[in-house]
Image (spheres, rainbow, N blue to C red):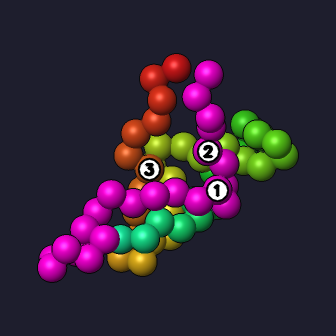
Amino acid sequence: MPPAARITDMHTCPMVNPGGVPHVGGPVLPPGSPTVLIGGMPAARVGDMCVCAGPPDTIAQGSAT
């Protein structure tokens, strides 16, 4: 089973600014899922926001399983 992301877990960002400067990922932001907890933390979901050195990101895709 693939790992599951939780609120506060770090993400990586594949985006690149003009000039070739890569974005830097950061934590997944709350609230996450109020009813699904992983290790006591809310599960991250598609559409949840993430901190990034560029503009905020959203989770665009998750595992199919």
14 left or right of 34 in image? left
Region rendered in magenta:
1-22
Q: CA distance from mark 1 to mark 3?
A: 12 Å
Residue tagged 2: 5
Q: CA distance from mark 2 to mark 3?
A: 10 Å
Q: CA distance from mark 2 to mark 1?
A: 6 Å
**Relative to the observer, which residue lies in front, 50 or 15?**
15
| Residue 45 rendering spot, x and y as whole percentages | 54, 43
For the N terminus, give its image quadrant: top right
| Residue 36 rendering spot, x and y as whole percentages | 72, 37
Q: Earlier in the sequence, mark 1 or mark 3?
A: 1
| Residue 49 rendering spot, x and y as whole percentages | 49, 60
Residue type at the position of mark 1: Asp
Q: Where, by quadrant of the figure, is residue 52 drawn?
A: bottom left
39 left or right of 11 in image? right
Q: Where, by quadrant of the figure, is residue 15 drawn?
A: bottom left
Residue found at the far front of this picture: 20
Q: Is residue 26 above or below residue 21?
A: above
Number of other residues with Cα within 10 Å of mark 2, as a class: few under 14, some 14 to 19, many 20 or more? some
26 left or right of 39 in image? left
Number of other residues with Cα within 10 Å of mark 1, as a class: few under 14, some 14 to 19, many 20 or more? some
Residue tagged 3: 59
Residue found at the far left of this picture: 19
Q: Please tell me whether mark 2 sits on a helix, a strand or a loop.
A: loop
Q: Nearer the viewer, mark 1 or mark 3?
A: 1
Residue at point 44%, 50% (across, down): 59
Q: Please tell me whether mark 3 sits on a helix, a strand or a loop.
A: loop
Q: Are marks 2 and 1 in contact (CB under 8 Å)?
A: yes
Residue tagged 1: 9
Q: Say whether residue 17 is magenta.
A: yes
Residue at point 46%, 36% (across, down): 62
